Image: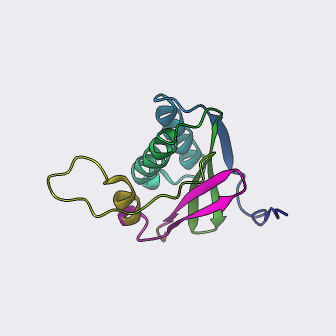
Amino acid sequence: MSVTVEAPSYLPAPSTVRLGYRPESAGVARQIVRNKLADWELRDLADDAELIVSELVGNAAKTGCLTFMTVRIRRVAARIVRISVRDGSRSLPVLIEAGEDEECHRGLALVHKLTRGQWGVTPDEFGKTVHADLRVPPD
């Protein structure tokens, strides 16, 4: 049984989009995140948020799923913005310490750094959701 918990009514509405497992999906996801942060007057988070969503969408695209992924940005609390990507693979992401000379395996390390370790994964019956939380700086 799945329970959906909605954000308190004082928080702004989230944005959710379904995207195919295609290279151009990362660009669409970045634009959605940037636009929503602008709506919320949180433009200072946009660069980090775009990097995060690019990494999460890129990882989802590598799963080889044939349906779609779901990208969501929402305020889970007044000072926390959550970016999440749900895909149809039950393979869990692994944080790998990449060597200095390695070109790949840096994505989750970057997400870990930008979120100060505030990211995670929730498996479900048909896949998983990877989320990353960004803190809204004080006024």
Q: Main secondary structure of the magenta part?
A: strand
Above-or-below relation of 76 to 28: below
With respect to residue 27, does 90 lie above or below?
below
Q: Is residue 115 magenta?
A: yes
Q: Identify the magenta region.
A: 113-136
Q: Nearer the viewer, residue 128 or 35?
A: 128
Relative to 5, 115 lies left or right: left
**What residue lies at 25% left-to-right and 59% top-to-bottom?**
98
Which residue is found at the position 20% from the left and 51% from the top? Answer: 102
The residue lying at 63 percent from left, 68 percent from top is 78
Q: Quadrant of residue 94?
A: bottom left
Instruction: Give the position of the N terminus as an image quadrant.
Output: bottom right
Query: Which of the two residues, 108 or 29, is positioned nearer the viewer here?
Result: 108
Q: Quadrant of residue 125?
A: bottom right
Residue 59 lies in the magenta-colored region = no
Residue 101 screen position, x and y as percent? 14, 52
Observer-nearest of 120 and 127: 127
Residue ranking furthest to the left: 101
Q: Is residue 17 left or right of residue 64?
A: right
